Image (cartoon, rainbow, N blue to C red):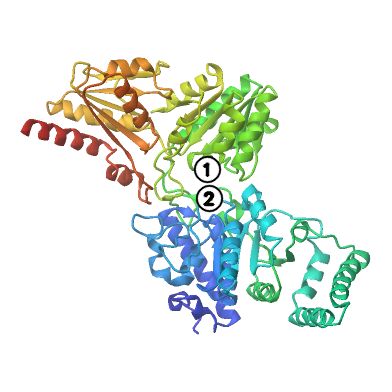
Amino acid sequence: MAEDNILSGISSPSDLKDLSAEDLDHLAEEIREEIVKTVSKNGGHLASNLGVVELTIALHTVFNCPEDKIVWDVGHQSYAHKLLTGRAKKLHTIRTENGLSGFPKRSESKYDAFDTGHSSTSVSAAFGISCANSINNDTHFTVAVIGDGALSGGLSFEGLNCAGRSKERLIVVLNDNKMSISKNVGSMARYLTKIRIRPSYINAKIRVRSKLKKIPLFGKQLAYFFSRFKHWTKVKFFGYQENMFEQLGFKYYGPFDGHNILQLQTALSAAKRAKGPVIVHVCTTKGLGYEYAEKNPKNYHGISAFDVETGEPISSSTGYSDIFGQYMCSRAESDGNICAITAAMAIGTGLSGFAEKYKNRFFDVGIAEEHAVTFACGLAVGGVLPVFAVYSTFLQRGYDQILHDAAMQELHVVFAIDRAGIVGEDGETHQGIFDVAFMNTIPGVTVYSPSCFGELEGMLELALYENKGVVAVRYPRGGELYMPEGYEYKKEDYSFFGNRSADILLVTYGRIFSYAAQAADELRNEGTEVCILKLNKIKPIADEAIGESLKYKTVYFFEEGIQSGGVGEVFGMKLYTSGYKGEFKLIAIDGFVKQAKVADALHKLGLDKQAIKDRISSDNKSRSEN
């Protein structure tokens, strides 16, 4: 095949089978160019995708998908996989409304074996698929591709522990781009692996074991003795020590150069011939092929649109995460008890500066939110003041720990819930719309929701120094929006704006207040008077706020969160039990929210300025006609 434009000729993985080694190397270059070009326009995950190009090619040349299943952990590294499975012409739509997802989606392609988006799920899911194959007498393979970062999540170890005791045809590819696994990952391990993956060695071992088992009376004992003698020889003469994976029951092959397609093909082919579960350990470089990402993979893990030539973001502005990070540094300077915790998100949550200045009080626990919550509880018991900064979508994983370890013990732990509400292009798996509802179920928890930067700082102050027990401050992705002229935060649980004598009350919190305030201004100019109740503390809701709302004929609650269990539902019930006789209308989210720009998603959900205004105007028109 001609060297140029190989990618355009790939419509399915079967098209890779007849390509030469030279063509495959050239294909890897084309894939990297396409990924860089696409992410520079749409934003997305760059460094992780550039690091697995050769591995993806090798997987699709050795395995036969979709019959063989590949489960990508997190899935933020599946762009090359999408390019090789018939979606190359659509890659430019990735992370856009109605376009390709930034993660694997079963509804998007038969080649996507499992929907992912959160970390550490691949081994458990792939093991489940393998077991189902056994039940159905299906001899196809299942492959879990997991990174060393995802391996820090407890769920991955639960999956490994269970799968290692089985005899399933499960292959776990460990994509190691920074972490050393055990002492025997070195030249001797490579030498032993080189021997073990040779087809002649594997076939000979199988033949010998089979023949030994056929010997009458003592066959099984001889086969077992042969296996133990082989292990003793490795330990005695080579100083070999079993690593963690082998102790769990996996055969271990590696480490291999994750950018050498031929070496990867050899290793994966050997894994297919092995009996039982196998670990294939590959070493890769995040960001390979794009200088800026290779030098600074953390900054290019998840990135907005950027200039390919300079590597600089096309637009950047101060966001809530930045203000949070600045506040934490300022407070830590005067308060030696403040500690910051993150789950592998120091940059994303704005804690990079804190990590540099206060190393002994900064804890990055890896992708382990459950551990982070309970660890914070331990810090609290020890007499310090822990602040766990975490994306809303990932805090879902810590629900039991918040309930059992923090709230029941009434420990003072502060949660800085970043990316609360709609986050946009990452789609269903990352929308921060559930934290309020699950926090509402936990007794004794206090939750604040700022609408501007000044409120964020003020509410963090309250969370740290004027509240006890579990306290959360939740704030959105991005920057602050419109605030009414002259508005000043006074540390109130709630506040009213507009005409208190109006018949219509709009209730909301967080950034939706900005849209409600704008809508109210425009409605007023058109002759419709409304009042706004802004909730600052959304759990618990102040009884006085309910009491003052009873006089309004119509109460609208606009909420950027899931309806079931949300603040609006609680507010409506409190109105009802307080004897409210008017009309209550709740506009909240009912279901998962697909990827789209934040502004577009909010409009469709009825939560932006125009939608709020249109809703009030339409209802007023209907009332007047009736």
Residue 51 in view: no
Q: Which of the 4 image quadrants contains residue 546?
A: top left
Local crowd at mark 2 within 10 Å, few (<14), some, or many (≥20)? some
In the rendered structure, the answer to whether residue 94 lies left or right of residue 59 reads left
Q: Nearer the viewer, residue 402 or 593?
A: 402
Looking at the rendered structure, the number of numbered marks drawn on it comes to 2
Q: Position of residue 375 (x, y in %)?
A: 66, 34
Q: Amino acid at mark 1?
A: Phe
Vertical position of residue 285 compared to residue 149: above or below: below
Q: Position of residue 560 (x, y in %)?
A: 36, 37
Q: Position of residue 237 (x, y in %)?
A: 93, 67
Q: Amino acid at mark 2?
A: His
Give the residue drawn at x 84%, y 80%: 212
Residue that sits furthest to the front in the current view: 217
Vertical position of residue 68 compared to residue 390: above or below: below
Q: Give the mark, 1 or 2, whose residue is nearer the N terminus.
A: 2
Give the residue drawn at x 51%, y 62%: 78
In the rendered structure, the answer to whether residue 571 lies left or right of residue 139 reads left
On the image, numbered disc 1 is attached to which residue?
Answer: 394
Residue 339 in view: yes
Residue that sits furthest to the left in the current view: 625
Vertical position of residue 545 compared to residue 374: above or below: above
Q: Nearer the viewer, residue 517 or 587?
A: 587
On the image, numbered disc 2 is attached to which residue?
Answer: 118
Q: Quadrant of the C terminus?
A: top left
